[in-house]
Image: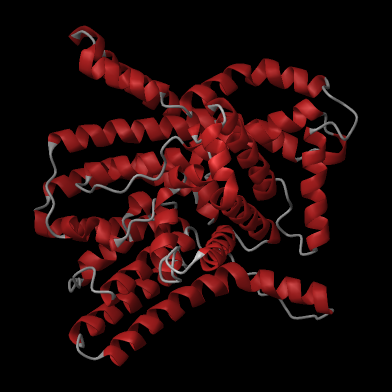
Amino acid sequence: MVFSSLTFLFAFLPLVLVIYYAVPLKAKNLIIMLSGIVFYAWGEPLYVFAMLLSTAIDYFAGLIINKYDDKPKVRLACLLVSLIMNLGLLGTFKYLGFIINSANAWFGLDIPNPNLPLPIGISFFTFQSMSYTIDLYRRNIKVQKNPISFIGFVSLFPQLVAGPIVRYEDIQNEIDNRTITEKMVGDGICRFITGLGKKVLIANNIGMLWTTVKAMEYSELSAVTAWLGILAFTFQIFFDFSGYSDMAIGLGKMMGFNFPENFDYPYMSHSISEFWRRWHMTLGGWFKSYIYIPLGGNRKGTARTLFNLMVVWTVTGIWHGASWNFMLWGAYFGVLIIMERLFMGKVLEKIPSFFSWLYTFVLVVFGWVMFDAVDTTIVDIGAMFGEVFTYIGAMFGANGVFMDNFATSSIMNYGIMFAVCILGSSDLIKNFATFIREKAPKWMQYGEPVVNLVIMLTAISYIATSNYNPFLYFNF
């Protein structure tokens, strides 16, 4: 799907945009619908029907909810059909194999595992489609009666397989009545190129170091190698996912949509709570709207609030993958956020900002160990904890080696890339670009399109010559 997605973007995107701009407004949603279906079917020729099934059920559920506005039982039944269908699809394809493997391992059973391939981006498009029926049931939005427009909403190819999660409420005014301006197209092109550079030139290159370290025996890693490896993943996942989000937001602008932002320099955060307000913001907003607040949010006392937070973070971990390490990862952040709500938040406000930043960054890095340094096929919880503690132990010298030849060569080979990652994950470049646009002489402002052209050509060249080009969040 990675090759297919990039092939589609660079081989077919210009054609799609030319047709999209050429047709009248009433036909633009048809182009969006068809291009989205082709985009998904390019990499998932069979599972495109799962996406269309989810879309069709939510579309008809929405029509019935709207028609029987004065019949609560009918409306509730339609909502339940939508929820059961979407969660059923998600559960069957994403979690069934994990549940069977765990049951077999724990209880000595021999239940056959169908080993169903995971449809690309199923967690994204099911959440997106499901939000429509929930918001319609709540009367927060108006019904979409045009099937082409609704399918176009779900299958918006810029963000179909890896987010950001765009709720119908976010773009309901743009679905059937949007204006495409030269400024939006220009801003969209710049945003797309920025995302492409982040993903291809930064994430891919720093990710190669983590791929190498992850393949090593954890019990033999030097401390510096362990830190370099997980820091490489720390930056890889940020630039990979935020880069794709930037590309999606940019393509959305080119097509007249204003998708919600998904990242806000999360590695500059000074608490875990702040980090999660800045990281994958559309997912956090989804869970807040559809799980945390319905459970009572913070309106029913401290004990209930802490329980609600733990539920949300457990579900957050489960959403990311069918493996015990993701559940541990979600619970880990849930506990940290609860601690900050109870007492740690006040401590962080009083200590120097550098130490609150360091506290946050280090704990996030430990979280990434749980997220990706574990074999996700492990069903033995003890073995999973063993891998996590072995890696973290290596980071603190438990293997008896502080630095080895691999660490030395890695610093030499990746030192500049780490510097680029640190700079790119801060807001310094953004602030500098703003200064250039607003206060620098005119002749300096002409440098931006030149820089964008260089980034675009370099990224395309890299894609054409490199075999290492993973999209991490296509797996969710």
As drawn, is 286 to the left or to the right of 186?
A: right
Question: Which residue corresponds to the image point at 34% horizontal and 49% vertical from the top-left?
Answer: 158
On the image, the x and y values in percent for residue 283 come to 44, 55
Give the image's coloring scheme. Answer: secondary structure
Residue 466 in the image: x percent, y percent? 55, 32
Residue 143 falls in image quadrant = bottom left
In the image, 448 versus 41, the foreground residue is: 448
* Count of marks overlaid on the render: 0
The residue depicted at 12 percent of the width and 39 percent of the height is: 181
Q: 198 and 356: which one is in front?
A: 356
Depicted 135 relative to depicted 269: above or below:
below
Q: Does residue 195 appear to the left or right of 107 in the view shown?
A: left
Q: Give the percent coordinates (x, y) of residue 467.
A: 58, 36
Q: Residue at 68% across / 57% down in the picture?
A: 328
User: What's the residue at 27%, 33% (across, down)?
Assistant: 189
User: Is there any visible trace of residue 453 in the rendered image?
Assistant: no
Seen in the picture, residue 463 relative to 387 is either above or below; the reply is above
- Going by the picture, which residue comes out furthest to the right? 400
Q: Nearer the viewer, residue 72 or 254?
A: 72
Q: Is residue 392 visible?
A: yes
- The image quadrant that residue 456 belongs to is top left
User: Please, is residue 138 above or below residue 308 in the view?
Assistant: below
Percent of width and height locating residue 312: 52, 63
